Image (cartoon, rainbow, N blue to C red):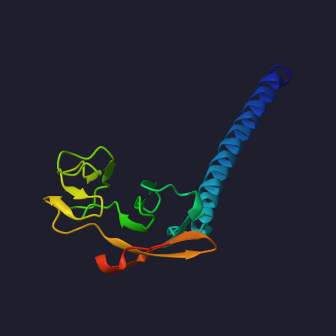
Amino acid sequence: MNKDNHPNQERHQLNKLNRRKFFTTIGNGASGLVLLGSLGVTLEYLTPNVLLEIPKVFKVGPIDNIQLDSVIYNPEHRVFVMREKEGYFYAISSVCTHLGCNTNWNPAGDANYPEGIITCPCHGSKFTKKGEVIDGPAPRPLDKFKLYIEDNKLVVNTDEIVDEDEMYLKV
Ligand code: FES
């Protein structure tokens, strides 16, 4: 009788071991997942949460390479740098003074402004090449920025808004 029970006992022991191994594996897996999750949270905490600010000052040029009667658009700073056929420069913002949409330079202009106009795609404001309002709803002209020359390059300072009498840089 005892001899007959022996294989059953062995099988029972074997099942017990397999079950233990199974639960141990599940437990280790769950612990691993928890560890991975907390590692992710820690890494996220340690990563600096910084917004990289675009510098307010940028350069264009060398000035000798900028053609007369041309417009250079800087999309990063949202600025039009204009050079008139007489050779002088000015820089104006492409940000519409209505609700801040980005305006577009239209070199063909229209019947009244054949030298080109700046238009806003959002609500239809129009500006002259020098940023003055032709049609609203824009309540005021486009901002004009301080310009100077450094190392034969044009430097635009978007932190310094100037009046019309200070906007032109003659070379
Ligand atoms: S944002 Fe330019 S017209 Fe409204």
**Which of 54 and 105 lies nearest the eye of the viewer?**
105
Q: Position of residue 133 (x, y in %)?
A: 19, 62
Q: Quadrant of residue 36?
A: bottom right
| Quadrant in which the N terminus is drawn | top right
- Residue located at (31% from left, 79% from top): 165
Left or right: 161 as drawn, with respect to 150:
left
In the image shown, does 149 or 118 lie closer to the viewer?
149
At x 44%, y 54%, the residue is: 70
Q: In this rendering, does residue 63 appear at all? A: yes
How many labels, in total? 0
Residue 42: x and y, percent? 61, 65
Residue 149 screen position, x and y as percent: 55, 75
**x and y percent of residue 20 in the render?**
72, 41
Q: Is residue 120 left or right of residue 3?
A: left
Residue at image position (61%, 58%) is 40
Displayed quadrant of residue 69: bottom left
Q: Is residue 33 above or below residue 39?
A: above
Decide if residue 77 is on the left or right side of residue 94: right
Q: Spot the residue most to the right.
A: 3
**Of the pair 20 and 139, the residue shown nearer to us:** 139
**Quadrant location of residue 21?**
top right
Residue 163, visible in the rendered structure: no
Q: Is residue 79 above or below residue 26?
A: below
